[in-house]
Image (cartoon, helix red, strand yellow):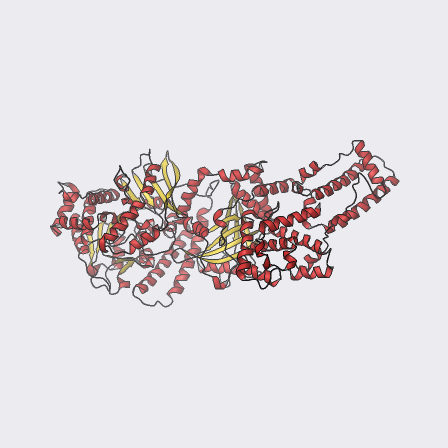
């Protein structure tokens, strides 16, 4: 029976993991002709994947141990042998009941191979093969050498039928016939040892063991047995036990474990793991789904798409999942200190630690990294949270505790959201942590699935469907909340907050200094060192602040997130999500004082080449031949119509008047408020709402709205500069014209123009104003910290009010509205894949306290700037709110209301002011509209309005 099982197991492994027989020429004959040897080799490949060995490294190892022919070409071994094994194991595990135990499976096959090998080869030969071919340590090799091809040669008889002297068997037969002992049958064995279902040979051994124990237990209850009887019985049992001991020494460790009685929790845990087989995620099965062991020559390689999805789209920094038999942890290095700590973890023999936090609804495991040399500490920690309210998380925690390791995949976040690989690290979990996690997981699974372990897959697939929308919404909140959200949302009276804001200002100052040198084309000696130090300091203070902010907060049962901020009963906030190339919408609105989130997938909107089309459009000059720029824009907006229709359908039936959009790349470059709707509507999105605004996250919009406001000393501040005298810029008339026109619309407006409009004076004056209007040249830059508006200065670096300088020196707690009436102040040139939508100048003003910012998505003409400014300020001067003033202004431009002269009110004041500067402005505007009917869509408003 055992031989048949061994042969069947070897055949199954070769069939399910082995290569096509056409590729058997890579094996030496002793492997190709012996299924058990080939099966052990295939298991060896799966074992080496645990620690992240690359296919090439595994191939090299197989050659060095003569498991494959040294003459076999690299592609044949890595591509036709190694990778197929890895793919299969990652989706299905290894081909036995304990599919997750790859290492145990490998050891079992080596033991079986050794037992059979010893039947035809000498002990010394097999000992040397265990060392040189299978690379077993000497101590483990000696244990394996005790295995035998036929261990049942030592199997003692069934005591019910025979014993050495006959006394034991006679006694047992008497006890059975008298009803003192119940005969143990196959069903009884399988009830306590379900793993023996396919091992009838071990079932027979277990039955004989049971009868031996039953006999001894029954005899202990006999009153006053004779000494002669006991001596004879003891003699029989000693002979029987010696034979069992000989048998046990020749069985494999796996077989001995199967014979042990499983405790209730152990049996339950195994049943749960068996039931969860093949719970894989398709994106994780591709060849490059997991990173390999770190290789210094390969640092900087790209990372798998699913990691990009989790980190960039989902905002993940530390994440756990499960790839077949491998528990996988993801860690993202954001600074050089992070990277140094992670690289220190790769050093052989390095010490690292674990900590845990228990809550009613989850368990959080903290990985404590080693402190790199020269790092003052404290050591970096990475959190991995397993929810005990979700079957999938509880099951993953049980799996982690059972296998006892995690495969840590490390990537680094560089530049503007780009990801680069660092490598994989194998982490062994300490026994006490494994026991704690196993107990928590079993308790959770008993509560969630009970004894119906076979329902685990079904429950995983169906659980949390009502929470999927909220999970998607929170992923966007995290992903789009980098930089400015932390500075606005994590407000606190704690010392940690003051330290964080000081570090934030210092980092912005270092970036401003670097940006100034960059714009002037100068080399900033030591700037890079200063910038790195400031980045590290801000990150450390941020981590301390987050720990303080999280302390004592109530935790949601399934995700540990705070409540979604409410923005009002008539406001909808919509996240646009790029999910594997398809657009999804996560819309949140308030109903009866509670947040309600819906998730819709726009399957027909495949981004495909869409990012390339938008990128090409963004690079085109507006005067490209044949109105190409305008046609590209119209087509891009038309492609978004289905998405906009989906937004409207999601909110149908609600009395919604305001819409806030949070786009993702590349949609943030487009005027989504101008997307046309399909017939019969024949209008744009902005026609269906009173207000359409933009914001990266609902939390940020809520934080801005609820921020502490200061009274303004100046109602309106105008900062205007023509660009005269600034290297690389021609002088334009529009800004000074705007300044005069706006000053005429208000009784008291402060104007800084030309020589007075230096970045320093402008920033100082902005802190006192309620409305800030900037009219100048705009400057975009690949380095987003160098983007800004061009004011007075004798060099470009000195003249530009950059994003970084605003963050370093700006304080706008009295500012309700900033108008950046310059070219491309609401867009960016960066090509990073981060979903952070505010990578432009507007973000700096919001981060430093401004409630809303009006900006532009492309170049505007002097006339367009003047007309827009006059209309907007005429409304503002009449007491209209900033959002309504902006909406009415863009509606005026979109519907060409200038063609019918106004009869009174703010519009009359605006048109009169424009007429005083340029009497034939209407005809000029008509001409510009013919060239670009969507000119009005260049203006957008961002923030809490």
Q: Residue furthest top?
A: 178
Asked whether residue 294 is in view, the answer is yes
Q: Position of residue 607 (x, y in %)?
A: 36, 48
Q: Nearer the viewer, residue 351 or 13?
A: 13
Residue 666 in the image: above or below residue 74: above
Horizontal relation, residue 457 to residue 477: left or right: right
Q: Residue furthest right?
A: 228
Asked whether residue 359 is in view, the answer is no
Q: Position of residue 494 (x, y in %)?
A: 42, 50
**From the image, which quarter does the C terminus lie in?**
top left
Q: Residue furthest front?
A: 22
Q: Nearer the viewer, residue 150 or 681?
A: 150
Q: Position of residue 647 (x, y in %)?
A: 34, 40
**From the image, which quarter does the N terminus lie in?**
top right
Horizontal relation, residue 781 to residue 921: left or right: right
Q: Nearer the viewer, residue 924 or 849?
A: 924
Image label count: 0
Q: Position of residue 399 (x, y in %)?
A: 57, 46
Horizontal relation, residue 332 to residue 780: left or right: right
Q: Quadrant of residue 807?
A: bottom left
């Amino acid at each position: 029976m055992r031989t048949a099982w061994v042969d069947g197991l070897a055949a199954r492994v070769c069939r399910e993991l082995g290569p096509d027989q056409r590729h058997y020429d890579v094996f030496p004959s002793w492997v190709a002709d012996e299924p058990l040897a080939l099966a052990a080799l295939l298991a060896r490949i799966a074992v080496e994947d645990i620690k992240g060995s690359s296919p090439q490294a595994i191939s090299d190892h197989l050659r060095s141990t003569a498991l494959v022919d040294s003459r076999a070409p690299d592609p044949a071994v890595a591509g036709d042998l190694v990778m197929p094994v890895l793919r299969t194991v990652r989706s299905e595990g290894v081909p036995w009941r304990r599919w997750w135990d790859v290492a145990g499976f490998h050891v079992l096959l080596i033991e079986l191979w050794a037992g059979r090998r010893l039947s035809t080869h000498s002990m010394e030969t097999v000992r040397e093969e265990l060392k040189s071919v299978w690379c077993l340590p000497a101590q483990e090799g000696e244990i394996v050498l005790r295995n035998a091809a036929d261990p049942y040669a030592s199997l003692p008889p069934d005591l019910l039928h025979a014993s050495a002297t006959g006394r034991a068997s006679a006694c047992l037969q008497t006890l059975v016939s008298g009803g003192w002992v119940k005969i143990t049958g196959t069903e009884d064995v399988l009830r306590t040892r379900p793993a023996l279902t396919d091992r009838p040979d071990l079932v027979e051994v277990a039955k004989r063991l049971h009868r031996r124990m039953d006999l001894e237990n029954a005899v202990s209850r006999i009153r006053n047995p004779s000494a002669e009887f006991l001596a004879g019985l003891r003699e029989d049992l000693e002979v029987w036990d010696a034979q069992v001991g000989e048998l046990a020494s020749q069985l494999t460790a796996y077989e001995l474990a199967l014979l042990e009685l499983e405790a209730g929790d152990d049996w339950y845990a195994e049943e749960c793991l068996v039931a969860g087989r093949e719970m894989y995620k398709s994106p994780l099965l591709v060849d490059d789904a997991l990173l390999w062991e770190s290789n210094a020559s390969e640092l900087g390689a790209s990372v798998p798409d699913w990691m990009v999805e989790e980190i960039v789209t989902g905002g993940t920094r530390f994440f756990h999942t499960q790839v077949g038999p491998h528990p996988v942890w993801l860690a993202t290095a954001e600074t050089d200190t992070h990277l140094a700590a992670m690289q220190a973890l790769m050093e052989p023999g390095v010490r690292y630690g674990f900590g845990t936090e228990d809550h009613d609804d989850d368990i959080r495991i903290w990985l404590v990294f080693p402190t790199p040399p020269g790092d003052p500490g404290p050591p970096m920690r990475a959190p991995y949270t397993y929810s005990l309210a979700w079957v999938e998380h509880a099951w993953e925690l049980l799996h982690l505790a059972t296998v006892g390791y995690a495969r840590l995949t490390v990537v680094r976040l560089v530049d503007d959201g780009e990801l680069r690989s660092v490598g994989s690290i194998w982490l062994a979990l300490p026994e006490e942590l494994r026991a704690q996690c196993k107990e928590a997981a079993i308790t959770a699974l008993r509560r969630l699935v009970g004894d119906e372990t076979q329902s685990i897959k079904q429950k995983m697939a169906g659980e949390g469907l009502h929470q999927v929308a909220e999970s998607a919404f929170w992923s966007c909140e995290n992903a789009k909340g980098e930089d400015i959200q932390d500075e606005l949302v994590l407000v606190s009276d704690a010392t940690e907050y003051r330290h964080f804001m000081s570090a934030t200002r210092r980092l912005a100052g270092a970036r401003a200094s670097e940006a100034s040198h960059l714009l002037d084309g100068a080399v900033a000696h030591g700037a890079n060192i200063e910038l790195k130090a400031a980045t590290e300091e801000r990150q450390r203070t941020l981590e301390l602040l987050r720990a303080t902010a999280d302390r004592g907060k109530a935790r949601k049962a399934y995700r540990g997130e705070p409540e979604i901020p409410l923005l009002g009963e008539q406001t909808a906030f919509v996240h646009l999500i790029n999910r594997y190339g398809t657009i999804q919408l996560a819309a949140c609105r308030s109903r009866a004082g509670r947040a309600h989130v819906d998730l819709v997938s726009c399957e027909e909107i495949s981004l495909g080449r869409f990012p390339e089309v938008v990128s090409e459009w963004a690079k085109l000059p507006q005067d490209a031949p044949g109105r190409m720029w305008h046609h590209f824009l119209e087509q891009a907006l038309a492609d978004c119509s289905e998405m906009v229709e989906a937004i409207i359908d999601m909110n149908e039936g609600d009395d919604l008047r305001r819409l806030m959009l949070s786009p993702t790349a590349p949609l943030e470059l487009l005027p989504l408020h101008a997307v046309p709707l399909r017939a019969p509507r024949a209008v744009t999105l902005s026609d269906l709402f009173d207000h359409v605004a933009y914001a990266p996250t609902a939390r940020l919009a809520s934080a801005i709205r609820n921020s502490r406001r200061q009274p303004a000393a100046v109602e309106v501040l105008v900062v205007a500069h023509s660009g005269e005298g600034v290297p690389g810029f021609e002088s334009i008339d529009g800004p000074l014209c705007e300044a005069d026109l706006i000053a005429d619309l208000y009784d008291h407006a402060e104007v800084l123009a030309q020589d007075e409009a230096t970045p320093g004076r402008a920033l100082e004056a902005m802190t006192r104003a309620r409305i800030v209007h900037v009219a100048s040249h705009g400057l975009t830059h690949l380095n987003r910290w160098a983007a800004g508006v061009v004011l007075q200065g004798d060099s470009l670096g000195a003249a530009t009010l950059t994003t970084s300088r605003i963050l370093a020196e700006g304080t706008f707690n009295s500012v309700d509205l900033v108008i950046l009436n310059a070219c491309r102040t609401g867009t960016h040139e960066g090509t990073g894949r981060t979903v952070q939508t505010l990578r432009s100048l507007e973000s700096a003003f919001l981060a430093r306290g401004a409630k809303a910012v009006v900006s532009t998505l492309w170049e505007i003409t002097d006339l367009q700037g003047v007309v827009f400014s006059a209309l907007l300020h005429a409304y503002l001067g009449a007491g209209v709110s900033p959002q309504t003033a902006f909406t009415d202004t863009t509606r005026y431009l979109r519907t060409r209301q200038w063609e019918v002269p106004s009869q009174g009110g703010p519009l009359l004041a605006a048109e009169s002011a424009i007429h005083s500067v340029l009497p034939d402005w209407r005809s000029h505007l008509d001409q510009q509209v013919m060239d670009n009917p969507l000119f009005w869509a260049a203006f957008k408003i961002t923030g809490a309005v």
